[in-house]
Image: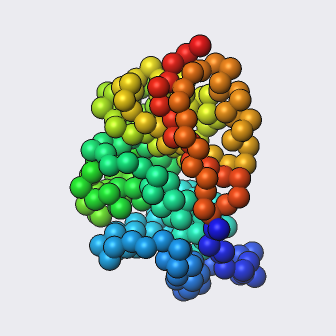
Amino acid sequence: MRPNPAPPQKQRTKRLSSQDVAALLAEDRARVLEQFTVSRETLARLDRYVELLVTWQARVNLIAASTIGEVWTRHVADSLSLERRLPPFQRAVDLGSGAGFPGLVIASVRNGATVDLIESNAKKAAFLRTVQRDVDLGGAVHAARIEDCCAALASADIVTARALASLDQLLGLVAPHIAPTTRCFFAKGRSHEQEINAATALWRFSMVKHESELEDGSVVLEIGDIAPR
């Protein structure tokens, strides 16, 4: 099950001090590390990533401000769960990367692999580049729309997405550009069955459903062999 975040804090109704945020994040981090085992080097990269996220959050809206103390249980844990499902790869592309979940977490765990991030928002793209450079992660940031990143998608072994679009929309975005051997890993919530039904009306594809160990009803859909009907 998903690591439980810290109980709601009364100070959430006002601006949290840096000490408040640090204390909440320390508790949140400990909960995630009880469930996920990562190397010392990976943890150092994740710690620096979260540190940069908190710093940038003060001037760029990367995540919901009310959840800043729950970065580990809300975002890092989900990303680590998705990373567990990925096969070995040389190049991955993360769609609509936003604050970097799951793309930057995957790059932190699979250090040495290339993880390209697609994010059309210029401020978020600048943040992603800063983390890649500071943490020494492989990959490029494409500050563009997904449909304009044909070359990146064409070279991908795997494609990932989390909390971005419906399954039929995701298939429409990637199908014209990815190679036949590319596998897609899309994190989906409790409405995934409805999304699958809607997508199968428009697309043919193979699918493996990986049940989430964090939240009942959530899955990672492993998709391949995509073709329009």
Where is 8 relative to 133, above or below?
below
96 to 55, vertically: above or below: above
Q: Is residue 212 visible?
A: yes
For the N terminus, the image quarter is bottom right
Q: Position of residue 134 (x, y in %)?
A: 29, 63
Q: How has the structure been colored for display?
A: rainbow
**Residue 119 relative to residue 8: left or right:** left
State the image coordinates of residue 49 (x, y, percent, origin top left).
40, 66
Task: Give coordinates of residue 88: x percent, y percent.
Answer: 32, 49
Report if residue 18 is visible in the image.
no
- Which residue is found at the position 34% from the left and 52% from the top? 129
- Give me the residue at 32% from left, 77% from top: 40
Q: Residue at x 42, y 59 (%)?
A: 105
Q: Is residue 152 above or below residue 60?
A: above
Q: Nearer the viewer, residue 126 or 191?
A: 191
Residue 77 versus residue 206: which sits nearer the camera?
206
Residue 151 image-quadrant placement:
top left
The percent position of residue 15, horizontal first and vertical second, equals 65, 75
